[in-house]
Amino acid sequence: MDCQALIGEAGGYIGRQVGDTPRKRGRGTRAALMYYAFSMHEDTRGLRFPFSASAEVVADGSSESIPARVTELSLRGCFLDMSASLEEKQRVQVKILYSGESVEAVANVIYVRPTGVGLVFSEMKAGSRDALQKWVLAELDRQAPSKRL
């Protein structure tokens, strides 16, 4: 479901809950709609963006580092394009390298596809959260429609 559809769905939900109509909505409503839209969405992966970065994965109980490519990224997890096979609910350590910075996290495999795996982060090393937020915000800015005067 795309962002606009989620906002529309959330707007209807909010309207039913508080008895308002679009005409009664005031300033700040878009932010509230965004919050409800994404909190209502049942997808545990979070809002993901196309992203391209190298990564290394080490499965729990192994010392072998598996190369991978991040193709989607969110504040809560990522999708790794990789040829090695991991299992759902498997715990892994992942290191994502991008623009001279890295994000290191413990993650759980939430789904497996023929092309790779979806991960949800459970713990992050110090400083990794800041780098991840910076990357996601930069991607948001890059994808935002440009404002022309």
Image: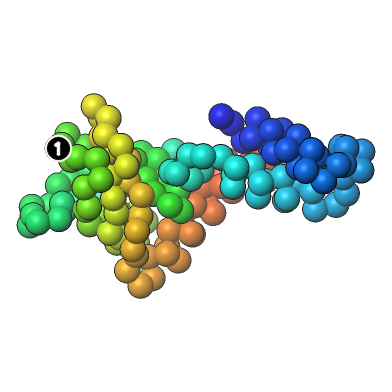
Residue 56 seen in render? no
Pick the front one: 14 or 80: 14
Residue at horizontal 40 percent and vertical 40 percent from the top: 72
Residue 17 position (above or below residue 2): below
Quarter that holds the N terminus: top right
- 5 vs 49, left or right, is right
Q: Is residue 121 left or right of residue 35?
A: left
Q: Residue at x 26, y 34 (%)?
A: 112
Tell me which residue sits at (33%, 63%) in the image.
123
SS for tag 1?
A: loop
What amino acid is labelled 1 in the image? Ala
Q: Position of residue 101 (x, y in %)?
A: 34, 62
Looking at the image, can residue 115 be seen?
yes
Residue at x 73% of width, y 50% of height: 32
Residue position marked by numbered label 1 in the rendering: 84
The quadrant in which residue 37 appears is top right
Looking at this view, name the residue that lies furthest to the bottom.
126
Left or right: 110 in relation to 60 = right
